[in-house]
Structures are given as C-alpha cells and as structure tokens.
Image: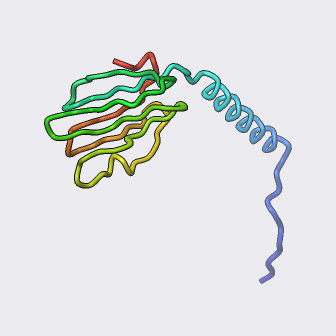
Amino acid sequence: METSKQGIKLKKRDGILIGCFLFIGIIFLGYTYLHTSEEKNILVKVDGKCVKTFSIKDTVTYKITSEKGTNILRIAEGKVWLEDADCPDRVCVNTGKIKYPGQSIICLPHKVVIEIKEDADAK
C-alpha cells in the first residue's frame, strides 16, 4: 500500500468562495466596530433599583452606601471599577476595570450592581 503526500488541492471556485467569506467577515467586523456608540452610561443599582447614572466620559469618585455596607466607585479615562469595599470577600474590588457595554461588577454582600449600557439601552 502506497501513501502519497499530496496536499489539499483547491480549485479556482474554492478560492473565490473562501475570499467571499473573508470579505463578508471583514465587512461585518468593520460595521460592528464603527457603529459602536461612544455614549455609554454607568448604571449603579442597589438592591435591584437604579440609584445613580453616570456617563463613561465622567471622572467621578462616588460612595455607594446601602444598609449592608459601603463601596467606592471610580470612573476615569473611560473605565469603571470599585476602588474599595467593606465586604468580607472583596470580589467586586478584585474584578478590576470594565469599559465595554454588557460588562458589570457585582457585590453580592451589599447587593450592588454596576453595569455599562449603551445610551440607547440605559433605563
């Protein structure tokens, strides 16, 4: 039994088809990138209720107080993070900085949620 080392041979139509898929993918990525809204809002929710809204363009340090404890929210240079919290696990502080719509920081012990929404989605 002989084995030959032949590669996959593509026909001209296969190359055209692959090129079309690549072109469509690049167009889709470009459209998504260019049409992402720069207007992003930061929603601060305590116990499920929105208590404050900020723009991602703001430079703010905001103290979030609830009956469970305190969190220090910081917004600067288009990023959001919890700088400090007096909860026992501090997972919310260790989450780090977020900057994209759909991302969130959650402090379960204090029932605090920080969300980034595009301007049209912010409610």
Q: Quadrant of the N terminus?
A: bottom right
In the picture provided, is 114 more to the left or to the right than 13? left
Question: Which residue sits furthest left?
Answer: 67
Where residue 88 sits in the image (x, y, percent)?
Answer: 23, 54
> Vertically, is 50 above or below 67?
above
Residue occupying image coordinates x 46% and y 30%: 101
**Color style of the picture:** rainbow
Q: Quadrant of the C terminus?
A: top left
Residue occupying image coordinates x 55% and y 21%: 38
Where residue 66 sits in the image (x, y, percent)?
Answer: 18, 34
In the picture provided, is 37 more to the left or to the right than 55? right
Residue occupying image coordinates x 37% and y 41%: 82
> Vertically, is 90 above or below 113?
below
Where residue 22 sits in the image (x, y, percent)?
Answer: 73, 38
In the picture provided, is 123 more to the left or to the right than 87? right
In the foreground, 35 or 116: 116
